[in-house]
Image (tube, helix red, strand yellow):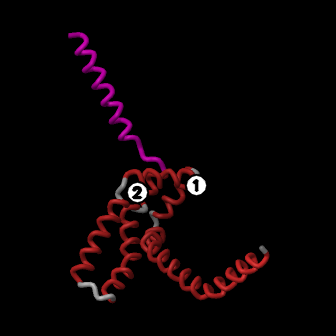
Amino acid sequence: MRFITSLLVLSFTLSNLAHAEDKAPPSAAEELVNLIDLEGTMRDSTSTAFKPYLDQLKQQGYAEETVKKIEVASQNYFDQIATDPGLHREIVGLYSKNFTEAELRELIHFYQTPLGQKTLKCLPLLMQDSMNLGQKYALKYAENYKAEVQKIMEADKEAK
């Protein structure tokens, strides 16, 4: 009987310790990742980035119903990624690795301001538009680059 009582007391104590860990305040990195709404930001970003592909499918003559099914399947896929606890944990780790606790607190303070909130809303679209501009300018110079690399490679073949 003492053994069972001891096991119950030990079990209760360990259970309370486990719950105490769960209730520990989040680190600054965890607080920041929660504040920036990683999941929502990823959903918005992927939807914005994926829209041109869906539009392209429509232009290629795929039925509206087919495009909608692809959109739903893609959103499910992106949701799996965005809600993966491992991703969340690793992103918290990235913030912890790259910023001090004081810097993280400053970021939290900034993102709680009206300008910070606006930045969080605009950032995904700004990043997408920036990538599109980068691609536009990469294409602008791509032919010259290809020609230059081809010339270098031909010179290498001739030298052998």
Q: Quadrant of the N terminus?
A: top left
Camera-nearest residue between 147 and 77: 147
Of 85 and 68, the residue lying toward us? 68
- Residue sitting nearer the eye, 126 or 52: 52
Type of amino acid at the residue the image marks with label 1: Asn
Q: Which residues are magenta?
A: 1-28
Q: Residue at (37%, 80%) from the top-left corner?
A: 53
Identify the mark nearer the N-term, 2 or 1: 2
Question: Relative to 109, does residue 22 appear above or below in the rendering?
Answer: above
Neighbour tally class for label 2: few under 14, some 14-19, many 20 plus, Cα within 10 Å: some
Residue 13 shown left or right of residue 49 in the figure: left
Judge left or right: residue 57 versus residue 117. Answer: left
> Which structural element holds mark 1?
helix
How far separated are the C-alphas under marks 2 and 1?
17 Å
Q: Residue at x 62, y 87 (%)?
A: 143
Amino acid type, residue under disc 2 in the picture: Asn
Disc number for residue 160? none
Residue 78, percent from left and from top = 35, 65
Q: Secondary structure at mark 2?
A: helix
Examine the residues drawn in magenta and state their main secondary structure.
helix
Is residue 8 found inside the magenta-colored segment of the image?
Answer: yes
Q: Residue furthest top?
A: 2
Residue 98, disc: 1
Question: Which numbered mark, 2 or 1, is in the foreground of this view?
Answer: 1
Determine which residue is flagged by label 2. 34
Q: Quadrant of the C terminus?
A: bottom right
Query: What count of labels does the image hold?
Result: 2
